[in-house]
């Protein structure tokens, strides 16, 4: 043990030789260290992505170390949905504001549930394999590397001992000058030479043993380090699963918001009508900018239904299929998102297609009349980009 610490100290001071590992082994060590460092960083940042609250992360860490199940936590979207629903009940679920709060709250609840599912999937398929590597394979590698380091120090200490023993043996075995040296000194010199010969034999024996142990430990460590390639393959598979989970999550969120936008656009006419009847001042408010910039056709009066004569308005409901576009001033628009028509009065849309749009008197400002070839129907303004 004394020789072990002596060798370690002399190496740090640059006073002792050190057994160098081959270049391939050094590359394996560097690759393993790089894998460990980046895995830790990716793991920590992914935890921040999935749970931005540091207090919640500490709580989850403590539950994990205590080997206890982490209690279910309400997501921010689910909490917002709860507040919106309670507010709608207080304001009146039948009012325009209350109805909208209920619909938006339901969407937030669905978003929160999707987030919970994504966090659970990412934790199992991505975070858990990374933790298993750091807490399992990497700890084993680190342990074997420490053993290899100790074996190397023992080996270098034996090499230094053998080197010193051989130097002393050579000095003691120097042939004395019989003419100038007394017989007693010659006997002492021969005895010392024999002692150092025995010391050299012991040092050589210990060197062979330590060299065998070092080679065996180096092979064990090499096999573990070469297993890093398998770790990369496993982490690559987990990364693909993480991306798939994240893609599904964002696709769900996008679809939920499209559905909400469609619902709000469909019910906006009813809400505007209720607001106008409840507040006379609302009738004097200017219409939406998008509708104001579009040309309007002359007002079409409501007439009784006559058999065989088409009416543009029946029972006060606008029928866009029986309305002709204005002679001039129609606008072109690009469709931003796909839209599925709710009934025969609406026009289904496909993203990136071009249509012609114009407004009609009495229409809700959030809706326009759209034409595509021989097809015609109402379209929501929020799904369009007006060009000219």
Image (tube, helix red, strand yellow):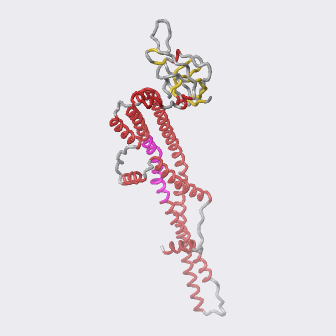
Q: Nearer the viewer, residue 257 or 88?
A: 88
Taking 377 as reference, is 121 above or below it? below
Q: Residue furthest left?
A: 90
Where's residue 228, x and y in %?
54, 51
Taking 268 as reference, is 172 above or below it? below
Q: In which image quadrant can residue 197 be found? A: bottom right
Q: Nearer the viewer, residue 156 or 216?
A: 156
| Badge count | 0
Answer whether residue 29 is magenta in the image.
no
Where's residue 84, x and y in %?
38, 38
Would you say the magenta stretch is mainly helix, strand or loop? Answer: helix
Answer whether residue 129 is magenta in the image.
yes
Q: In which image quadrant can residue 175 be found? A: bottom right
Q: Nearer the viewer, residue 82 or 215?
A: 82
Which quarter of the image is occupied by the C terminus? top right
Where's residue 348, x and y in %?
52, 23
Q: Residue at x 35, y 32 (%)?
A: 93
- Highlighted range, magenta: 118-142
Q: Nearer the viewer, residue 64 or 73?
A: 73
Q: Residue furthest top?
A: 308
Where's residue 149, x and y in %?
52, 65
Taking 76 as reference, is 172 above or below it? below
């Amino acid at each position: 043990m004394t020789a072990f610490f002596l060798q370690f100290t002399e190496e740090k001071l640059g006073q002792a030789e050190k057994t160098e590992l081959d270049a391939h082994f050094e590359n394996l060590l560097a690759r393993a260290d790089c894998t460990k460092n980046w895995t830790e960083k990716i793991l920590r940042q992914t935890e921040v992505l999935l749970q931005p609250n540091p207090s919640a992360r500490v709580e989850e860490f403590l539950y994990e170390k205590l080997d206890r199940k982490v209690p279910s936590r309400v997501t921010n979207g689910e909490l917002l949905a709860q507040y919106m629903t309670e507010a709608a009940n207080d304001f009146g679920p039948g009012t325009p504001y209350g109805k909208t709060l209920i619909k938006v709250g339901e969407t937030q609840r669905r978003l929160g549930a999707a987030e919970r599912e994504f966090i659970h999937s990412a934790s199992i398929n991505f975070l858990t394999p990374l933790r298993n590597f750091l807490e399992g394979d990497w700890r084993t590698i680190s342990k074997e590397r420490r053993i290899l380091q100790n074996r190397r120090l023992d080996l270098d200490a034996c090499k230094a001992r053998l080197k010193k023993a051989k130097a002393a043996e050579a000095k003691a075995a120097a042939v004395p000058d019989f003419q100038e040296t007394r017989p007693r000194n010659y006997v002492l010199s021969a005895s010392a030479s024999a002692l150092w010969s025995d010391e050299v034999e012991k040092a050589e024996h210990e060197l062979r043993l330590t060299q065998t142990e070092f080679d065996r430990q180096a092979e064990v460590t090499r096999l573990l380090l070469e297993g890093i390639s398998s770790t990369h393959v496993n982490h690559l598979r987990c990364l693909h699963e993480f991306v798939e989970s994240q893609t599904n999550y964002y696709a769900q969120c996008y679809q939920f918001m499209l559905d909400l936008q469609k619902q709000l656009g469909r019910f906006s006419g009813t809400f505007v009508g209720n607001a106008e009847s409840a507040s006379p001042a609302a009738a004097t408010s200017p219409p939406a900018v998008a509708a104001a910039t579009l040309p309007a056709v002359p007002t079409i009066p409501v007439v009784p239904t006559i058999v065989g004569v088409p009416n543009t308005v029946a029972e006060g409901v606008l029928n866009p299929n029986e309305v002709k576009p204005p002679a001039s001033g129609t606008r072109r628009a690009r469709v931003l998102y796909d839209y599925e028509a709710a009934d025969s009065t609406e026009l289904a849309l496909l993203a990136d297609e071009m249509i012609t749009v114009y407004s009609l008197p009495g229409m809700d400002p959030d809706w326009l009349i759209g034409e595509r070839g021989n097809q015609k129907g109402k379209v929501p303004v929020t799904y369009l980009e007006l060009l000219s």
